[in-house]
């Protein structure tokens, strides 16, 4: 039987099921906007890839990422948010109404759209990196650094994030290796100064990571190549329990770029402290519009703001 590619019409469409999307759904549902939320492939978002979350208020004993995201989902569903598993494959934001095309071929029209599609941390792409993800390999020092107190760790990258993560970890860990592929740091001068003046940060310029090694209980170290391809190329080993990637994030904005203003990193630009984009009726919340903080709590907060902005927009305020 042929499928009918029906177009459904809703007041509020939310794209993404991380803390930003679910929080937007809680607020939008309680404001009678009858939101429809598409979860995307990663139902629950990035936090479903981590174990303990210890810095989200309201969980004094900590909580695992998957449980926390299930709690958020149930809270949104309790107020009537219509949560659907599905991927938005394309959008037409020339409305209102705005239209989203789903991966099953159906379309949905909405008076207001909240984009909460998050950002994806970049990894080096080593098979061993995959193997130790969650048991030594992390892309978030603020999130996971605490688990490596008193231990030796490494950070990869030479930008502001890498320096910031190294400085943060230096306050918790014994030794921090900063692995930089070039012979200079790209980070701002002030960050560089902080790195160079920290007694327990050792900068390894012109080093590439060839491989990570360890056992079934976790990461034990990294094999690095110094000056790859040069006559004095050398393989070196460092012993570390934690290996932090800080080589940039890719915001999930490719399907929106035709319509929305993005910054040079691909993040959606919003108007001042609001979540309004350049297109009336389209709002952005969470990591997808935040190159700076990228935390569960800040994403949840901007999801709340996006629902309030959408509610006011729909009320003509
Ligand atoms: P995300 O959580 O990235 O969710 C994006 C959502 O959009 C996903 O559901 C995805 O399926 C959906 N999506 C994407 N594209 C589409 C599409 N085309 N159609 C439909 N849906 C789509 N933060 C903390 O505060 N504390 C921590 O301890 C912590 N630990 C972390 C550990 C790890 C390993 C990582 C990677 C991150 C961690 N973070 C932590 C950061 C935190 O996960 C993010 O800041 C937060 O999840 C961002 O929320 P978000 O809702 O903006 O986006
Ligand atoms: P970034 O500036 O793009 O730096 C990424 C770093 O990762 C670069 O040093 C890059 O090396 C390195 N890198 C990329 N791919 C790599 C690979 N495959 N192997 C090894 N190294 C790799 O990203 P960012 O540091 O996340 O910063 C993003 C933006 O946010 C910047 O504008 C930054 O200034 C800003 N930011 C500001 C602050 C602050 O002001 N406090 C804090 C964090 C971020 P190369 O240098 O060789 O390209």
Image (tube, rainbow, N blue to C red):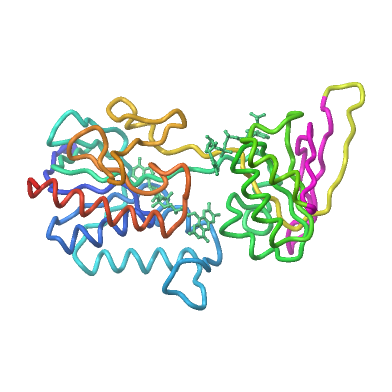
Residue 205 is covered by the magenta coloring: yes
In this view, 44 is above or below 196: below
- Depth order, front residue of 111/217: 111
Quadrant (top left, top right, bottom left, bottom right) of the N terminus: top left
Extreme residue in the right direction:
232
Percent x, y of residue 230:
86, 22
| SS majority, magenta | strand
Q: Quadrant of residue 193?
A: top right
Magenta residue span:
199-228
Which residue is pictured at 88% across the width and 37% down the height?
A: 235
Residue furthest out toward the bottom = 61
In this rendered view, identify the residue nearer to me: 6 or 156: 156
Asked whether residue 111 is drawn in magenta, I would say: no
Question: What residue is shown at x 33% (from left), y 53% (from top)?
Answer: 302
Q: Quadrant of residue 185?
A: top right
Whole-percent x and y of residue 210?
77, 38
Q: Residue furthest left?
A: 316
How many numbered marks does the figure carry? 0
Q: Residue at x 84, y 33 (%)?
A: 226
Q: Is residue 33 left or right of residue 65?
A: left
Q: Residue 252 location, x and y as percent?
A: 41, 38
Give the percent coordinates (x, y) of residue 220: 79, 56
Taking the spot 57% from the left edge, 40% from the top edge, the residue there is 122
């Amino acid at each position: 039987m042929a499928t009918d590619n029906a177009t459904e019409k809703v007041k509020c469409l939310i794209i993404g099921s991380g803390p930003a999307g679910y929080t937007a759904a809680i607020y939008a549902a309680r404001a009678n906007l009858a939101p429809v939320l598409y979860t995307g492939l990663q139902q629950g978002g990035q936090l479903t890839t981590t174990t303990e979350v210890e810095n989200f208020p309201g969980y004094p004993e900590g909580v695992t990422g998957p449980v926390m995201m299930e709690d958020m989902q149930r809270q949104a569903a309790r107020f009537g948010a219509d949560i659907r598993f599905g991927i938005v494959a394309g959008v037409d934001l020339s409305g209102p109404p705005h239209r989203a095309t789903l991966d099953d071929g159906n379309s949905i029209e909405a008076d207001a759209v909240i984009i909460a599609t998050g950002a994806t941390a970049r990894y080096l792409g080593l098979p061993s990196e995959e193997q130790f993800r969650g048991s030594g390999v992390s892309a978030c020092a603020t999130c996971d650094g605490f688990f490596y107190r008193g231990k030796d760790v490494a950070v990869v990258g030479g930008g502001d994030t890498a320096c910031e993560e190294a400085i943060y970890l230096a306050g918790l860990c014994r030794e921090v290796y900063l692995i930089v592929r070039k012979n200079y740091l790209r980070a701002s001068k002030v960050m560089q100064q902080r790195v160079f003046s920290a007694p327990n940060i050792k900068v390894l310029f012109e080093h590439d990571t060839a491989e990570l090694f360890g056992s079934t209980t976790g990461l034990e170290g990294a094999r690095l190549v110094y000056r790859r391809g040069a006559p004095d190329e050398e393989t070196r080993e460092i012993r570390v329990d934690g290996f932090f990637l800080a080589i940039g994030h890719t915001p999930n904005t490719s399907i929106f770029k035709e319509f929305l203003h993005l910054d040079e990193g691909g993040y959606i630009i919003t108007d001042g402290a609001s979540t309004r984009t350049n297109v009336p009726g389209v709002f952005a919340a969470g990591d997808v519009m935040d190159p700076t903080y990228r935390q569960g709590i800040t994403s949840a907060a901007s999801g709340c703001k996006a629902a309030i902005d959408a509610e006011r927009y729909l009320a003509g305020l």
